[in-house]
Amino acid sequence: MTGHYCDLSNSDVFLTIGSNNVECHPVSAKWVQKAHDKGATWIVVDPRFTRTAACADIYSPIRAGTDIAFFGGMAKYILDNDLWQKEYVRNYTNAAYLLDPGFDFDVKTGMFSGWNEQTKSYEFSTWGYQVDETIPADASPTGAFAWTTEDGVPEFTPPGNKVPKKDMSLEDPQCIFQIFKKHYERYDLDTVSAVCGISVETLELVYKTFGSTGAPDKAGTIMYALGQTQHHYGVQNTRAMGVIQLLLGNIGLAGGGLNALRGEPNVQGSTDMGLLVHNTPGYLAWPTVAKYPNLRTWLDLETSSGGFYTNKPKLFISQLKEWFGSNATLQNDYGYDWLPKLGSDNDVTTMSTFELMNTGFIKGYFLWGQNPAQSTANTKFAREAMSKLDWMVAIDIVETETASFWRAPDLDPATIDTEVFLLPAALPFEKAGTVVNSGRWLQWRYKAVEPFDQAKPDLEICDLLWKEIVKLYKDEGGANPEPILNIKWDYDIDGKIDPRAVAQALNGYVIEGKKLLTTFGDLKADGSTASAMWIYAGFYANNDAPLDPSEQKVGARGREDKGGLALFQQWSWAWPLNRRVLYNRASADVDGKPWDSSRSLVNWTGDAWDNNDVADFVASRVVDGAPTPVAPNNNAFFMNWDQIGRLMIHSLDMPVPEHYEPFESPTDNALNGRENSPMIRFADKESVKKGTREEYPIAVTTYSVVEHWQSGSQTRHCPALVEAMPHQFVEVPEKLAEERGIKNGDLCRVFNNRGSIHVHAFVTPRLHTLLINGKEVHQIGLPHHWGWASMYSTGDVVNDLAPNVGDPGSYIPEYKAFLVDIEKA
Amino acid sequence: MAKLAFYFDSSRCSACKGCQAACKTWNSLPSPLGQDENPFTGSYQSPLDLNGDTRLLISFSEVAGGSKGVEWSFGRRSCFHCTNAGCVQVCPSGALAHDEETGMVRVTEDKCIGCQYCKYSCPFNVPRHYGYNDKINKCTSCLDRVSHDRQPACVKTCQSETLMFGSRDELLAKANERVAKLQEQGFERAAVYGGNELGGLGLIVVAHHGIESLSLPANPRISGMVNLLDILKPLAGLGAAAVLAGLGVSFLTGIGYERHKLRYDEETHDIIDDETNEVLAHFDFDEEE
Amino acid sequence: METTRRGFLQVSGLAVFAGLTYSLSTQTKAFASEVDPDWKLIRTEESTSVCCYCSGGCGLVISVRDGELINIEGDSDHPINEGGLCSKGASLFQLRNVIDPETREVIPNPNRVTRPLVRRAGASDWEELSWDDAIEEIARRVKDTRDATFVEKDKGVIANRCDGIASLGGAQLHSEDQYGVVKTMRGLGLVAIDNQARV
Amino acid sequence: MARYIKRHSLQARITHDVFAVSGILLFLTGLFVFIPPLADAAPATTVYVIRIAHRVIGFIFILVPIISAILAPGGFKHYLSNYFRRWNKEDITWMKKFIPYMLAPKKVHMPNQPELKSGQVVADGALMLGAIVMAISGLFLVFGTWFVDLSAGLMVFMRLLHNIGFIWMIVFVIPHIYLGAGIFQPYRKTARLMFGDGKVSESDALYHWGNWAAEEFEKGEKVVEEDD
């Protein structure tokens, strides 16, 4: 979330799309209702009439997987009807920047310029800005890079800063505003209506209502979740929403923003933590063989020419210092080479790991409370692949479908040689530690009871394993033991592994005297500071009580709310730096005056900043040893090198979101000549077994219900929840039910090339038969919480049906839109 | 009349069932533990109705129509804590009674004798019973919590501020205000329920799609038979007293009465007073034969 | 009462030892003078926590008596949920304990796994084993696989990578747990590391 | 020596007595449901036991006459036929004189009667009817609470019937006991009929059922002589 849950109460218009927020994030209902009471309007766009739709003012159905068409249409509507926030767009986005003259989009082929057939990806040269000049990096004593000359800082070459050409009138045909506008000319109401299956009247109502937030003093927010991301163009779905919010000037405002409602209690934390192939903790690039063969190339390529990331080396070196401790020195590149480097031969993201297990390349598998045998796409294939593993270690509170994959109904245990260890994990309240919610609030959980029986906290399990492995390598040697033996592992307090010691490491400290740091601004690239997670610096920084979380920001329980915008600055701590609304500079105009004085996050009084939130921009600078206010400028997005919001980008799979059809779609692409995004991942894998619309004419989407959660391992473990929603079902529109002779409650078979499941039918007017490009398309829905492994509630695995193709940026599978057929069982 | 009351606003309810679960956990009510023991109900409503282990559930009803294409209404199915409570009226053991302080229908489980008359006297069919001895299971309005200055478990857990608990007068006023606002917003059928029904209910409902959408009876009444039952009690006493009085008089008049012995003479076919030898009756058996 | 409790939780945070539990003894009068023996929360100690389902971050108050979980409900002081919890949050108690429908007694949730288990090759069921044995056996397998699949150099560049092991998950864990996972897994040379963010 | 008529068989007496005793127990246990303060005063388990007892006894109450009828279908038929006999002038007279007789037994004299006097036909018949109502409504209440889910309306109706039956029974049982147990002075010794050996003395037989007694003496089959 760019904002946070309480901030929803500041909105004028809500657009819930690709999210079922009152079911999947029930507490959001509280804050939306608060705004609703003040007169806010709530729009829900969803393939199903959900419980969220029941609460909303306006509901529109939509064919799953057509969000870019929907938002493209909205962009066109906003521009055609002059609803965009002009001053905002001109100053805080790259609308005025002139694009490379080589840029092109071919509607016939559906391809942007720059396609490389060899790499099956785009080259970005034609997507970039026209550059006026490049200002070399300033490492002089007063320059931005002066610190690079200090002792202990590794040598590297800071990049020069490009100055792009602009046309502030936005009239130059080569400026991004004009190219963007031209790109969406095709997305007229009739076309979008035909693609999405939404009536023109409803489309207009939704566009007009949400477009009204383009007024400078209005704030509109978009709540989204996996309904946007689980597509092979999920990142572009998200971009499309971001672009709309930039056009309407909604990013950075209290009650505005683009709010990803994240699905897990600490998925924000696990994403922050770099429990992902390509990241280190704090969103820094993980070393790769091809791009970053050594520390210097990492620093050269990753250091930004402008904005905050000019400081990246400080963050990375501090991280290496926390990783390897005193073993990391300037001489050994702070241990850079001990970090494993990604190769380029194999993709190793989740979906690919099953391909690699299937070929025997991956032999061992650790699972930390995740259940891919139930939850990954094409689970049947995943389970077959798992059966080729040598060993698996599952750490969980219950026997999940993954821990017991060998007793899946479609497998024979006798033929599976995988050894599976199931280690009992402690419950969240049987251990202490931090969780990060969707609003980036870090909160401490105290240990309330001892773990039941022999269950143990995950950290303790890590500790036991690590110490045993270190012992083995010390005693026996083996494949390069150095990375193992040089790791700093000193998180004991009173002789026992302790989350408080880890919290200190995450926060960061001056190595000399282990003084906790209150801001990442104090991190150094010279090896004198250590911080595992620079963005958390400050959350656990009270040096007076380092062992008492209740005395740390993470345990803060202050109820003050300065400014009355439900920011609750004194309650817990939000990364970064306790900032509650990201990009809050954009809540005020170029002169620093809030667009809406009743929603003031930051405010330039003429000689100083009077802020209710922690500034997300350079608000002060140390001049002659004293902090001095920095007068307003238009650098509202200073995490980007160009420090502005980007209507068009020069990376990823598309410079501007373009509609493509889902991998398995019930119709042809009506907007361009290409069916799927050219960069769709894994579509060529044998395991995918694409089905055609002739074989499988029914469009399906998958989702959650409020009573259950994710793979159901926890909620199917709670009898009250099982009782409240005991069985899996398929929601079927009445017309389809009539055609297939299906009655409410009938057992049905839902199937495609990948799998076949039996579920009860729930015949309902809440699902729709849509008119898509002139043809009727039935859309059904499947909740995905069931599997065979529960003492209380079992069902077939819905994800057996989902295609294991994914997005080229996020590698997230396309769970949300594919094809099946249905019959009465 | 209830001094305190619950308040339920269907226009805010998101049917998260937090109340349903909180009621179970706070009150230590079990749910089935058998594998797939709960049936598929063909609805989001589960269990389909209250039972011996379920005092509160969220009801669902969906009909096509309205500006959004579907009207999906969520309701609270639980005790209404009626002022004129059929259950209290019939409860023979004092297990169900109005709590003096709050006016809610309180449950003293220990006193319940399992007769289940309450179940059949409730116009809302709310009381249920559990266990081998059919103990009452019904919303207690968490009086244990209330007496410790806590909101009932369902109210405490409600996130969308759909449920409230407090002064009945205030909540009724709030409900009327809310309905006026909803009607302004185009919910023409919006209505308050519970204001006057059965002397005023301890659960005030705001039904934004109308009270039919929540299957609330338009004019709940305690069955006439239940009232009749009440009349029968004094009637029984009266009857017994009258009979006894009459018999008493009879007894007194009969005291000391020594009947003359009678005998039958087969020869003459006569009944004869043994003391006076008077023939009291004569039978003509032969003639008849 | 809600306001006094609020005060309590704030103030007592200063007074607790080791910062892990809040003691009932310092609570407001309403609680300290509690004598009703039938009161469910009699003699309980409270601590705060955060719900483990969606990313809402709803606050919890957890009541414990004699080391056993008695109750979990929303934290009324918490600015996000203000004491509320959805059905999942309201059922958190059952992650650990459930009510036996036969006896209506609180019992440990029988569906939970609380001992290390191993399923041997070809076996059709679990065997129990001790933690020591489990750790020893797992460490041995990790080492064998790492040694067999380690890539020290890739295309001439130092890689120090272990290709043969993958790690998945972590979004359920505490950040401190996650750091433990990321550091040990990366430390072994794993690059196939993902979590629920990839779903 | 005195003469007696064997009026009631052993089976008839057992049936009556078990039926009567269970009826009294049902009355007593039922009071705990009928009069709230009683249940309120008793401990919960006691009340529970009483309630279960009420139901168990209820089954005995229902089963005993049925079993008896099955065991002796002839007797049952004869018993029933007495209730459905033709009424004659004497019966009308008897009924008319009943109340005056009860209040002035010394002065008012009743006409002779057959085996079942008209007062018995009415009073015992009313008891039988009441018992049947109690049995049927009781069965509904038991099944509706233990075994099947019946509609609330039906259940309340059954409860109403049960209560009306209860009053009915009170009105007819009390005089029945008053007369049957011989509390009413002219009726002394009638208790022997059902709670004794089932025999009625010559004098009493002639007093109560003159017509029937005369017939029996004529036939002599049931007449026995005993020492005084």
Image (cartoon, coloured by chain):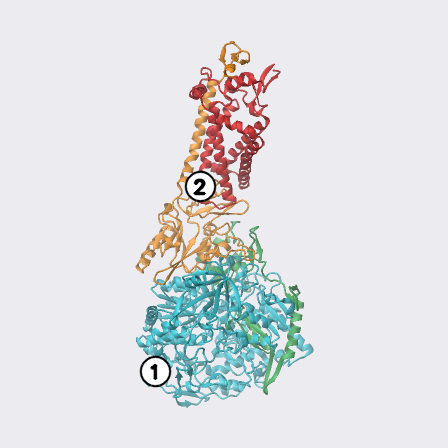
Chain colours: A cyan, B orange, C green, D red
Residue C69 is marked as: none
Which residue is denoted by mark 1 in the rendering? Answer: A178
Number of numbered markers: 2
With respect to residue A237, does D144 lie above or below?
Answer: above
SS of the residue under disc 2: helix
Three-letter residue code for mark 2: Val
How many residues crowd around disc 1 within 10 Å: few (fewer than 14), some, or many (20 or more)? some
Query: Residue A237 placed where, x, y %?
Result: 42, 75
Three-letter residue code for mark 1: Gln
Residue sitting nearer the eye, A175 or A487: A175
Query: Residue D25 placed where, x, y %?
Result: 54, 33
With respect to residue B6, does A227 lie above or below?
Answer: below
Query: Residue A7 placed where, x, y %?
Result: 40, 68
SS of the residue under disc 1: helix
Occupied quadrant, residue A609:
bottom left
Q: For the view shown, which residue lies furthest in the right direction?
A: A476
Residues tagged by mark 2 and mark 1 found on one chain of the structure: no
Residue sitting nearer the eye, A542 or C158: C158
Residue sitting nearer the eye, D120 or B286: B286
Q: In this rendering, which labeled residue sits more in front, label 2 or label 1? A: 2
Please report, as a chain letter, where disc 1 is located.
Answer: A
With respect to residue B265, does D61 lie above or below?
Answer: below
Residue sitting nearer the eye, C21 or A515: C21
Using the rendered image of the protein, determine whether residue A76 is visible from the camera's viewpoint. Answer: yes
Using the rendered image of the protein, determine whether residue A350 is visible from the camera's viewpoint. Answer: no
Residue D156 is marked as: 2
Occupied quadrant, residue A129:
bottom left
Image quarter where the N terminus of chain A lies is bottom left
How many residues crowd around disc 2 within 10 Å: few (fewer than 14), some, or many (20 or more)? many
Please report, as a chain letter, where disc 2 is located.
Answer: D
Query: Residue B274 placed where, x, y %?
Result: 53, 11
